[in-house]
Image (cartoon, rainbow, N blue to C red):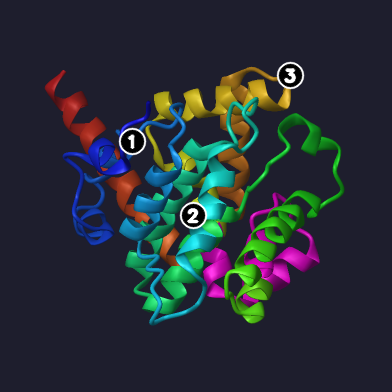
Amino acid sequence: MTPPFRHRFSPFPVSPGWLVNGWPRSIGAMQQVGFSQPCARDDLIALCAWAGLRVTKNRRRFATSGLTRIAGIATRNGRSNNYHHAGHFAHVVMAAAVLAGKAGIGVADRESLVLAALIHDLDHHGRRGKRYPLYRQERLSVRIAGRILLRHGGDPRLVRRLERLIEATALTSDAHRQAILSGDPLARLLADADVFASLFYERGLALKLTGMLKLEQGLADDVDSLLDGFASRMAADGLESEAGRHLLVELTASRQSHRNVVTEKV
């Protein structure tokens, strides 16, 4: 049985603010959270609370039972999926919390961002999804979550915004996605959170994650080529949010400094 998330976090920081304030050294704590070991439902709920999603009767954005239902579906997400499972959700939620802290967004926006991170690949169809038209998978995820949120007191305006945010995670550069990204700072943060692990984590772990994606999607290229190709495309296009760009610059500088020190010692 998977232990509660709070135990998997131990000795993890009390808040995402600790990660932001300790950046870039604090990325090591993020990398310690297991990816290939999917979380249980309560793990995801606890993680969302840690990230800033507070579901209370006073706020009434939607009922706690709605979040419980969504997290339950996320933990069953494509049991045959090697990559798009609850472990991926956990790391995207964690990255969203760090990016939100770096960007200094307000409480309501943070809640929307964390919720979008939780549901962005809900009921992902794995390899079958490769045959889908553009945005179909993203819209399927929002449709499932949206119905649950509306049944549990959610605001229709929140559901409509979630659809826009999640469409921003599609790997395309078409005009529709660009319009969303240019018009909504949360969309830019979510897009960066979705690719955070592959770009920010140390290469060994990023290769492991790429290998999971290769297996799930049936990709022909070797893992190194897939990761290097992805990194090259991202280097050319750049991250979407200012917060993401700042974090990556700081991390890259720190790693380069460490390599220089090692070289001097050798």
Q: Which of marks 2 and 3 is in front?
A: 2
Q: Quadrant of the N terminus?
A: top left
Q: Residue at x 51, y 29 (%)?
A: 209
Q: Position of residue 76 (x, y in %)?
A: 58, 37
In which quadrant will I find the C terminus?
top left
Magenta segment boundaries in residue numbering: 162-190
Percent coordinates x, y for residue 62 in the rendering: 52, 72
Which residue has dot 2 on it?
68
Q: Does the magenta stretch include residue 174?
A: yes
Query: Do the residues under discs 3 and 1 have CB atoms within 8 angstroms?
Result: no
Q: What element carries label 3?
A: loop
At label 1, the amino acid type is: Val
Give the mark nearest the N terminus, 2 or 1. Answer: 1
Q: Specify the quadrant of the image occupied by residue 56.
A: bottom left
Q: How crowded is mark 1: few (under 14 residues within 10 Å), some or many (20 or more)?
A: some
Q: Residue 33 carries which label?
A: 1
Q: Mark 3 or mark 1, which has the lower sequence index?
A: 1
Which of 26 and 36 lies nearest the eye of the viewer? 36
Are dots 2 and 3 in contact, CB under 8 Å?
no
- Alpha carbons under labels 2 and 1: distance apart: 22 Å
Does residue 52 lie above or below 213 as drawn? below
Q: Which amino acid does label 2 sit on?
A: Thr
Question: Is 71 covered by the magenta stretch?
Answer: no
Asked whether residue 90 appears in the rendered view, the answer is yes
Q: Mark 3 points at which residue?
A: 220
